[in-house]
Amino acid sequence: MDLSVIVCAHNEEKALGAQLDALLAQDWDGAWEIVVVDNGSTDGTAALVAAYAQRDQRVRLVGAFEKAGQSYGRNVGVRASAGTYLAFCDADDIVAPGWIAAIADGLGRHQVVTGPHELDLLNPRWLADSRGRSIEAPVGTFFGIFPCIRGAGWGIRRATWEDLGGMREDYRAGEDHELSLRCWLAGIPIVGIPDAVVHYRYRDTARALWRQGFAYGSNRPRIVRLLVEAGKPRPPRLAGLRSWILLVLRLPTLITRQGRASWVWIAANRCGQVVGSLRERTIML
């Protein structure tokens, strides 16, 4: 098996079919499989995947029921897979045509690759505009200090995955940044592949936006602590000051859906960072 695509799913019956359809429509000459990891779903996710597996032998269903979390699910999926190359995408997004070929070709030349998130296809205009861009750069960064994988679409050689020890299962958010940091400390480049596009789906309710933003924000100080422990530069302690000012200036925009989505996202990230700073005992506002 040349490549294994790992898709973690928890109660994704409504969205997963579109992602599986997009993956099965990919055109690539290598031998590849799709390993869907059911992380304790209570809806029809498992039945949906089983139906796809009956129609196409490239699809397999694996259960991951001991604990919740994408890091745990990805580790389970990798252990159940057979590919020399590993690719990861999310159950509620849609990979663009050519994604598997782009990831596989990239892994033929590099140890870790990632690609851009496209934001218009799966999000209404007001939601896509709430973050002010239509497509992200192929590679992210952690405050410009080290490069980061785009968590909804990336790939890694199995040998590199094993050398790094897989994903840390004590992370429920920020696990992509933590793995990216380990790559950087080990001298492993994260290379952006512009053609490895994933159509990314934003959370579309205030509650879901808050929960995700808060989780992201609260885990950033944890990454900062790891940087300090490694003797590396850390972000400025007041790097988020501009965002706090924006929250005040954008109060009038709360009358629109786009304004509310933008405000909630920024506020959740900032409040999460404050809580994370207290937990990790490192100031990061």
Image (tube, rainbow, N blue to C red):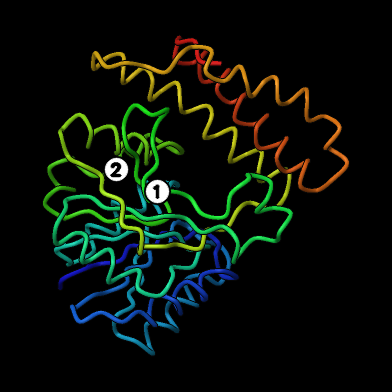
Q: Is residue 108 above or below residue 270?
A: below
Q: Which mark is drawn over residue 150?
A: 1
Query: Three-letter amino acid code at disc 2?
Result: Met
Q: Position of residue 155 (x, y in %)?
A: 27, 56
Q: Position of residue 37 (x, y in %)?
A: 38, 62
- Depth check, front residue: 201 or 173: 201
Task: Write the residue at 30% across / 70% down.
Answer: 100
Q: Which mark is drawn over residue 279?
A: none
Q: Which numbered disc flags the more N-terminal residue, 1 or 2?
A: 1
Q: Position of residue 102 (x, y in %)?
A: 28, 66
Kindly state the secondary structure of the residue where label 1 is placed. loop
Q: Position of residue 7 (x, y in %)?
A: 39, 63
Q: How many marks?
A: 2
Residue 5: quarter of image: bottom left
Binning the other alpha carbons within 10 Å of mark 2 as few (below 14), some (14 to 19) or many (20 upward) gives some
Left or right of 257: which side holds 242? left
Task: Write the residue at 49% across / 11% down.
Answer: 237
Left or right of 281: which side holds 53? left
Left or right of 40: which side holds 34? left
Circle 2 residue: 167
Binning the other alpha carbons within 10 Å of mark 1 as few (below 14), some (14 to 19) or many (20 upward) gives many
Task: Write the residue at 20% across / 29% down.
Answer: 185
Query: Three-letter amino acid code at disc 1?
Result: Arg
